[in-house]
Image (spheres, rainbow, N blue to C red):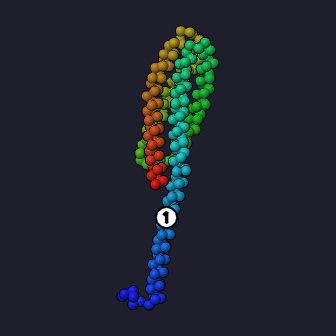
Amino acid sequence: MNMINLKIGVRLAIGFGTLTIIALLLGTLAVVGTNTMSTNMESIGENRVPSLQALAQLNRLRMVIRAQTYIVLAYETQPDLQTALRSVQEERGHSWQQVNQWWETLLKTPRTSEKGRVLQQQLQEQYRAWRAIYVELDGLIVRIAAATDFDQKPALFTQYRQTISRMVPISDRMGQTFDAMTENNTTRTNQMIK
């Protein structure tokens, strides 16, 4: 059967039918594409951005707390040591509140890749070690501030320095994991955007 031999009405019906099928296919593809884009945008807004914010804030707070840790050493020869250490303790308390809030935000964000889940698990272990070493450091600050014996303070400051030397590698590893998680999150976000 040849198209030329068909009546004009049949040819028009076939032509319009073909155009209708093509339009339906294009419409279906557009709806599926829009739904996929909407899902990806929702994931970016609800998961990716909050996770990136939490990682950035936790990494910043890690360094703020580290600076607070080192500032204690600058007060070693200060005559008004207790006042200076109380100030550090107040700042530290505020910093820990922020750390707790951002840590909860990070934990609430679901990991959608195996690499993300592995990095999250690794970070949780490092976070526990980091918080544990800071329990020691904060306890030493309390002991230094409460020390009344002048000869006891140098020994406490020596112990404080030794604890700092144990804290630094823990903090550095955690910082590297923050960077790895941020890179993984950014890479996956860019893939979604493409």
Above or below, comparing residue 14 to residue 93 in the picture? below
Residue at (60, 16) in percent of width and height: 81
Q: Residue at x 51, y 61 (%)?
A: 35
Spot occupied by residue 21 in the image (x, y as percentages of width and height): 46, 76
Residue 17 screen position, x and y as percent: 47, 80
User: In this view, which residue lies farthest toward the front?
Assistant: 4
14 sits to left or right of 104: left
Please tell me in which quadrant of the rendered image residue 94 appears: top right
Label 1, residues with CA under 10 Å away: few <14, some 14-19, many ≥20: few
In the rendered image, the quadrant that contains the N terminus is bottom left
Q: Residue at left 58%, top 38%?
A: 101
**Relative image position of residue 86 (x, y in whole percent):** 62, 21
| 135 vs 167, nearest the viewer | 167
Q: Quadrant of residue 10?
A: bottom left
Is residue 139 in sight in this rendering?
no
Above or below — where is 94 with respect to 181? above
Total labels drawn: 1
Residue type, mark 1 in image: Val
Say if 44 sits above or below 87 in the image. below
Q: Residue furthest left?
A: 1
Q: Position of residue 103 (x, y in %)?
A: 54, 38
Q: Where does label 1 land, which residue?
A: 32
SS of the residue at dot 1? Answer: helix
Q: Quadrant of residue 141?
A: top right
Q: Residue at x 47, y 85 (%)?
A: 12
Q: Is residue 11 left or right of residue 101?
A: left
| Residue 176 visible in the current orientation | yes
